[in-house]
Image (cartoon, rainbow, N blue to C red):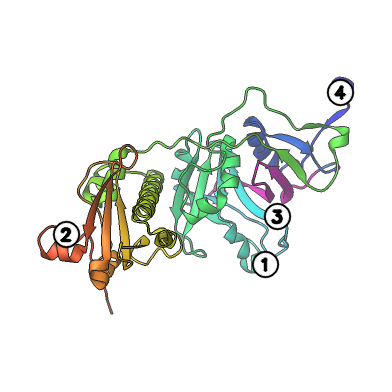
Amino acid sequence: MIGGVMQRRVRFHGQSRLPLAISGLLNTGWRIRSAPDETVLPRNGQAFVLEGGAEDKRIRLFAYTVTSSSRNRPHEKRVEITRTYNGTLMRSPLFEDVVIAFDRERETWVGIDGRRLDYGGATHNASTFLPSAGFANVPTSGIHILPMESNIISLEFAAFFNPNSIAEYIFNRDAIHAGSYSGRGKFSGNVVVKKPANLKLEKGAFHGNDIVILGPPSLSKAAVVDQQAVEAMISGDTAAIRKLKLTREELLEIKRRCDEIGLKGERWALDYERKRLKRAGLHDLANQIVWVSQTHPYEGYDIESFNEDGSPKFIEVKTTVSKSKQFEISDNEWRRADELGSQYEIYRITGVESMPNLRRLPDPIGLLKAGALSKAASSWMVKYS
C-alpha cells in the first residue's frame, strides 16, 4: 500500500522470461498502465500494447532461454522454440508475434526471425542455433546484427542486444531481420532513467486481456558518419571504401547518408529548373516538370524538364558535398544518355550543403567522344550458362 492505495505485483509463471523483458522497458522510462486481472500470467505468448508515440506496437511476446548447443559444438548456442503455427500456436489478426531469448551467462537478449514460427515440422519445434560470438560482441546500447546460415530460411539475421535496448529491437524489428537496419531507428537513442517504474499496479489497473505499457518520447541516435567514406561512396572509389574497414551497420548508415545528399541535390536541381523556366516566362512548362526518380527510380535520369524552345530535357543529377570532379554513373544511366543524345544532360552539383555550384554536362556521350569527359569501367557483368 502506498499513500493509502492498495497495490499488487503483476505475476507471471515462475519460469517465464517475460518479466526480464519488461524490466528492460521500465529501465528506459516505460511504465505499465494496466494488466490482466489474473493470478498468474502465462509463461509465453502474453499480449502487450506498447504505446510508444505515433506508432504503437501490438505484440505477443515469446521469451525463451538460450542454452548450450545439443550438437557438441562449443562455438554455437541453441534456442528451443516450442510453439509454432504448425502446432498449438494460432495466429492473431491483431498482434504480431515477437520471439526473443535470454542468455543468462552474459545477460543478453537475442531477437529471432519470426518466420521460424511458420516451421516446426511434425514435432512443432523450430529450434535455432546461434553463433556464440554474437553474445560476446553486444554493445552497451544498440543492436548487433549477424547474418546466419539457415536450413529453413534463405538468409536469416539474428539480433543481439542489451536488455535496455529491447524497445529499439521491437520497434525496428522488420528492418533488423531484413538486414537493412541502420542503427538509427525508433528508441535507439533512449537511455536508462534514474528512477524506473516497477511491476506493481493499483488494484483498479488490473483489467482487460493485454498488458498496456506507456513509452517515453522516442529518441534516435545521432548519426556519426565518416565524411571521407561518404565521398568515396558517392564517387565510386571502392578501394578507399575497402581501406576504411567499415562494419555492416556503418556501411548502411553511409549509404543512407549518400541517399540523403542525393535527394538534396535533386531538390536543388528541381528548384533551379523551375526558376529558369519562369524567368523565361514559361510558367506552364515550369509547372510540368516531373521529379521522375521519386516515382520511377530506374528510368536512368532523375528529372524531366524542358529547354526554352519547349523541347524535352532529361536530367541526371550527380551531387556531392565536396568539390570533387569525379562521380559514379550506372550502366543504365549511360545507356539512357546514349539513347537520348542531346536531350540528356548531367547536372553536377558540388558543395550542396554549403554553397551549391552547378556544372552542366549536356550530351555526355558527345562530350566523351570529344574528349571533354573520361569514363572508366567500375564493374563487370558476368554471365554464365
Measure the alpha-carbon separation of dots 2 and 4.
Answer: 76 Å
- Position above or below: 80 against 24: below
In the shown orientation, is residue 294 left or right of residue 127?
A: left
Give the mark toward the camera: 2 or 3. Answer: 2
Measure the alpha-carbon separation of dots 1 and 3.
Answer: 18 Å
Q: Is residue 67 magenta?
A: yes
In the shown orientation, is residue 372 left or right of residue 130?
A: left
Disc number placed over residue 95 in the picture, else none: 3
Which quarter of the rendering shows the N terminus?
A: top right
- Position above or below: 45 against 323: below
In the shown orientation, is residue 115 left or right of residue 2?
A: left
Q: What residue type is disc 1 on? A: Asn
Q: Secondary structure at mark 4?
A: loop
Residue 38: x %, y % from top left: 85, 43
Q: What residue type is disc 4 on? A: Met
Measure the alpha-carbon separation of dots 4 and 1.
Answer: 45 Å
Residue 358 visible in this rendered orientation of the protein: yes
Disc number placed over residue 376 in the picture, else none: 2
For the residue carrying disc 3, how many other residues have a C-alpha within 10 Å: few (<14), some (14-19), or many (20+)? some
Give the mark toward the camera: 2 or 1. Answer: 2
